[in-house]
């Protein structure tokens, strides 16, 4: 008999003839990110399930190896996403937010295009200047979680670290060429450096280090990024050091966890646009429906003009 705590109730909303939402109210397991509205800082909540810990999460999420494996190949309009999932089953799949399924579908469509794993992330510096750069998507912390937390890595000496410590709110812009779909994802960032106080996050950082290539590891023992480099100086040896081992996590290696709270999804082929908002951040009541907006415990979605 199915555990009643794992029962998932669904809410369906038809917006137009062939366009359908299916939203699910999940039982939360594993790693959860809660939003603290007063301080606008991410609060990390680890909700243990009976048979789950960080080591099993790391096994299931191997950096770039765990992305682009689900969804269908439809590119003409938004779809509901996967009906089955090889490593979670139908129940686990129902915990996944719809926008996550659509990202995974696009990654599958463009799996032969390495550039599809790159997105732009914009931050605000301590002197209130905007900054944007391209980074590599390193997978979801748990792709069937209702939270949709994304991973990226960076050098702890880079300017983006100062930006995110000053203002953890940031925005990702991710465009998929084949489907002509764009995702703008507003997030709160958590920087996991070598001296982070949470042992679970330190374990997640180490697992991510183990999943990157030797060439990628070398970059974290290069000279300080952004510092002056004298002209005419033979310093090539400084940028070709021996690679650190898998168990020698470089001090400057940082894992950044991006906890989304609003997603703006635009499908240019069909001129459809949906906004997904974290319901807990909006104060909506469970199961409440208002016009074109459906609110449930994890996310609310709204159809808007493109």
Image (spheres, grey):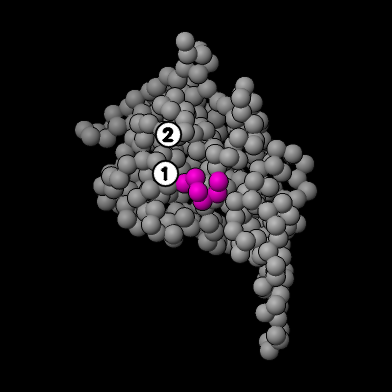
* Residue 193 coordinates in the image, percent (x, y): 72, 50
- Based on the picture, tell me whether residue 66 belongs to the magenta stretch: yes
Which residue is most to the top? Answer: 1
**Residue on which disc 1 sits:** 69
Whether residue 193 is visible here, answered yes or no, is yes
Circle 1/circle 2 CB separation < 8 Å: yes
Residue that appears at 55% across and 25% down: 28
- Based on the picture, tell me whether residue 229 belongs to the magenta stretch: no
* Direction from residue 240 to residue 87 in the image, left or right: left
Above or below, comparing residue 285 to residue 202 in the picture: above
Query: Magenta region's main secondary structure?
Result: helix
Crowding at mark 2 (Cα within 10 Å: few <14, some 14-19, many 20+): few
* Direction from residue 39 to residue 178 in the image, left or right: left
Q: Nearer the viewer, residue 78 or 125?
A: 78
**Residue on which disc 2 sits:** 86
Residue that appears at 30% across and 45% down: 73
Whether residue 169 is visible here, answered yes or no, is no
Above or below, comparing residue 115 to residue 108 in the picture: below
User: Which element type, helix, strand or loop, lies under badge 1?
Assistant: loop
* C-alpha distance separating marks 1 and 2: 9 Å
Part of the protein shown in magenta:
62-67
* Direction from residue 267 to residue 39 in the image, left or right: right
Which residue is most to the left? Answer: 17
Above or below, comparing residue 232 to residue 108 in the picture: below
Q: Nearer the viewer, residue 277 or 7?
A: 7
* Residue 171 coordinates in the image, percent (x, y): 53, 51
Residue that appears at 44% across and 60% down: 115
Crowding at mark 1 (Cα within 10 Å: few <14, some 14-19, many 20+): some
Residue that appears at 47% across and 33% down: 87
* Residue 213 coordinates in the image, percent (x, y): 59, 58
Q: Earlier in the sequence, mark 1 or mark 2?
A: 1
* Residue 167 coordinates in the image, percent (x, y): 65, 51
């Amino acid at each position: 008999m199915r555990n009643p705590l794992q029962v998932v109730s669904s809410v369906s909303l038809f917006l137009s003839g062939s366009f359908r939402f299916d939203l699910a109210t999940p039982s939360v397991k594993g790693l959860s990110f809660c939003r603290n509205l007063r301080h606008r800082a991410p609060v990390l909540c680890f909700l243990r399930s009976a048979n789950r810990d960080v080591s099993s999460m790391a096994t299931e999420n191997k950096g770039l190896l765990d992305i682009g494996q689900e969804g269908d190949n439809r590119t003409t309009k938004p779809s509901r996403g996967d009906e089955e999932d090889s490593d979670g089953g139908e129940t686990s799949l129902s915990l996944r937010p719809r926008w996550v399924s659509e990202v995974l579908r696009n990654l599958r469509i463009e799996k032969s295009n390495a550039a599809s794993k790159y997105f732009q992330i914009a931050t605000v510096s301590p002197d209130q200047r905007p900054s944007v750069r391209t980074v590599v998507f390193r997978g979801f912390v748990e792709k069937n979680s209702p939270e949709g937390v994304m991973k990226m890595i960076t050098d702890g000496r880079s300017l983006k670290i100062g930006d995110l410590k000053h203002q953890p709110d940031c925005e990702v812009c991710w465009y998929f060429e084949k489907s002509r779909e764009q995702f703008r994802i507003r997030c709160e960032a958590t920087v996991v450096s070598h001296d982070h106080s949470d042992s679970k996050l330190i374990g997640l950082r180490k697992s991510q280090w183990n999943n990157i290539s030797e060439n990628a590891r070398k970059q974290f023992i290069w000279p300080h990024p952004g510092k002056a480099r004298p002209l005419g100086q033979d310093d090539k040896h400084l940028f070709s050091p021996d690679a650190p081992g898998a168990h020698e996590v470089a001090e400057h290696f940082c894992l950044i966890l991006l906890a989304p709270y609003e997603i703006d999804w635009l499908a240019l082929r069909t001129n459809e646009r949906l906004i997904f908002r974290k319901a807990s951040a909006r104060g909506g009541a469970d199961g409440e429906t208002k016009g074109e907006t459906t609110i449930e415990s994890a996310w609310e979605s709204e159809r808007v003009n493109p």
